[in-house]
Image (cartoon, grey):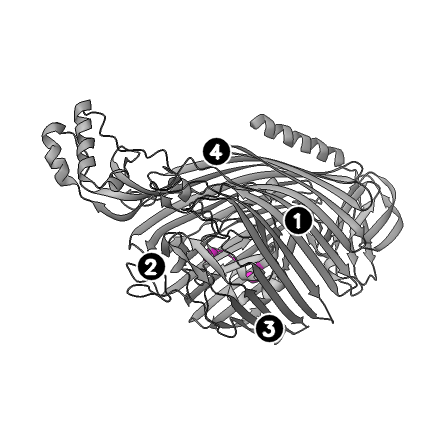
Amino acid sequence: MVPRALSLLLVVSSLCAAAEASGRIQGQVTGPGGEGLPGVRVSAGAAEALTDEEGSFSLEIPAGTYELTFSLGAETVAQAGVEVREGETARVDRPVEWLLNVAESITVTSASRRRERIVEAPAAVTVVTGEEAARQSSHGQVPKLLELAPGVELTQSGLYDFNFNLRGFNTSLNRRVLVLIDGRDPSLPFLGSQEWSAFSFPLYDVESVELVRGPASALYGSDAFNGVLNLVTRSSREGEGGTAQLTFGELSTRRLDARYSRPLGGGWYAKLVGGIQESEDFARSRVGGAEYEGLPLEAIPLPRDTIDVSFGGLRLDKELGQDSALLTLEGGTASSQGSTFLTNIGRVQATDVRRPWVRMNLNTRHWNLLAARSDRDADGLVSLGTGGDLYLDSYRANAELQGNAGLWQGKGRLVGGASFTEIDVDSADPRGVQTLMHRPERERRQGLFGQVDSDLGDRLKAVAALRWDKSSLREGHFSPKAALVWAVRPGHTLRLSYNEAFQSPNFGELFTRIQVARPLDLSALEQALAPALGGTSLGLGNVPFLALGNDDLDVEEVRSYELGYSAVAGRNLFLTVDVYRSEVEGFVSTLLPQLGTSLGRLNPDFGPYQAPRTLPPQVAALVISTLASVLPPELFALLSNDLDGSPIFATLSFVNVGRVDTQGMDVALQWSPARGWSAGLSWSHLDFEVREEAAENPILPNAADDRVHLSLSYVGERFDSALGLRWADGFFWRGGIFQGRVPSYQVVDWSANFQVSDRWSVGLSVANLLDEEHIEIFGGDFLGRRALGHLTFSW
């Protein structure tokens, strides 16, 4: 694989070298109010660039005299006579009087791993700006930033137990949407899901949030199955000074978090963030009784009644020369105690979790080098169903090099790169005994990716991408992508795309080894056989009943066709319609009986029991015949050998099963009727047809057929307010031991902020304003109102 990686990088390098220019044009495009205008296409000769969020641009170009063209949507202006000298930078600042729809200037990077206008992106993308995140910062829950976005299936159990999904087939501890924080993957290696309580930044430190809807493995690899959630935090150079926010309210919530940044000199900048919180949870004990019918009772009460969260981080940024190169060095840690989350085999409370991490990033105009490591030290996990203590320490280290270049005289663009990831998981307790697996496990992943897009005319763009991924646990996998983006007329864009994606089995599905019932004592039988054993031990004293992972599992796969339409109407309306059809196969089942089903023996690694090999054949036959005569047939059939040869009852395991066709639609309308006002409406519909399933594992999307999101907001100079409503149709949830119907529900949220002075502001945020007690997952906690007030001081 190394030769392939080097080949790709050499191609990218040569193309980038060809793009090197002997001069530069830099400047800023500003709108009628003097504010920077993002998304403006600036071109001179074959060079082309988009302005960033501040309206700034930079072009590398051979020496000469040029006419600069500035265009956005239907608006175009030109400026002639711009002289570029070798080794020098020409400055061009251009004010324009364009009256634009806000959607025309939104730019995104996640759809193509490079900056482009949202209406030209080859995927459906939703954006939350840093200003929007700051206005919602008091609740401190990252998934709620996108709860009103089209297509989002956000389901909640405890205070921080969220399942964030798109396009159906949700599960407890969902991992079908890849989450990145500044390029770093913070997911739990054992489960693949997110630990939302352990994110180490306040929400007002968010620069932008981008959600790519639809399969995205062609650029992001495994687990970008239904989409990508890309969070970018603010650099040390932004927002010089400090912000501290005190939050208090229902569920006995008390939180204090802060951010401070300043220049250090010599091109260095520093940012420090930190926070601490204490709150009650929605979770309640299920010992002796449960909140509603159909819930299994638990063995022990909640070990903790409160959730305690703390975090801190330091970031250093260094500007490198005039090529806008930036070196970032940062690290941080988060601690979480008391968060309860739902799994397929019951609820688990994390009583002691620590999440240290580090990141290095070097970004230049044509290259981006990222290296990061995220650790998780969980010395306190308690299974509420069994009362057992669990331990789970892990880390994920990754490195990625990405390059970009222009092609064909500015008519094409190339993005490509290579990545490497190492994941390590260990479930040993302080005595060295494994609590969730047989032994520590490690995985190494490599990936190569590339995307080319080309202008086929003034209004048509073609996109093609391909990624190859290989893991030490599975064979190589290709993920292709193709798209056409057609500007039907100014402000109206039609997009047709095809994507393939895959989701790797997590470590829990591959390597789980956990007791599901009390061991069976067969020592009396061993004593009866002792005269024939000659001192050989059979280990029948306490034979465990185990749920076992299956390392023969293959990846889940999806092939998706999508048609998207976006329309900018005047200055007030923005409409998007996305219709998709997908073919999904190879679902990894929940834990199923190892035997006694139409699927046969699920895990071939745990076959019929074999007596110790040191025994003579006739003695071994005697042992097996004796066990068969003593144990009930259905129990003897489950008797097997663990990896070390000891006897076990292999009761449950996983298997790939099923094929489903899905189709759906997301429709969203954003309306700005007057200055400062905005109203939104979205409707999402999901339908599916099962082509193949097993009777023991009937496949359900675990999502509502229809969802409706409404929003109304006002943002003024000193006051802002937002009202949102989420409505979900009732649906049946099936996830492990939790099976039942989730009734239809509607949730109203409201927030408001008032700027008292230049330094002080106050606000109120209310989740579930009408206090409509409801569940969003069967097996989950009843959710009620949570009203929070906050006081913010800036300096």
Q: Which of marks 3 and 2 is nearer the N terminus?
A: 2
CA–CA distance between discs 1 and 3? Answer: 30 Å
Residue 128 lies, in percent from the top left, at: 63, 59
Give yes or no for contact between labels 3 and 2 (Cβ–Cβ under 8 Å). no
Q: Which mark is in front, 1 or 3? A: 1
CA–CA distance between discs 2 and 1? Answer: 45 Å
On the image, numbered disc 2 is attached to which residue? 296
On the image, numbered disc 3 is attached to which residue? 753
Toward which corner of the image does residue 360 lie, by quadrant?
A: top right
On the image, numbered disc 1 is attached to which residue? 109
Residue at 17% x, 39% y is: 630
Q: Name the outermost residue toward the bottom.
A: 756
On the image, numbered disc 4 is attached to which residue? 474
| Secondary-structure class at tag 2 | loop
* Above/below status of 646 relative to 214: above
- Residue type at mark 3? Asn
Residue at 57% x, 44% y is: 583
> What span is in magenta?
196-205
Quadrant including the N terminus: top right
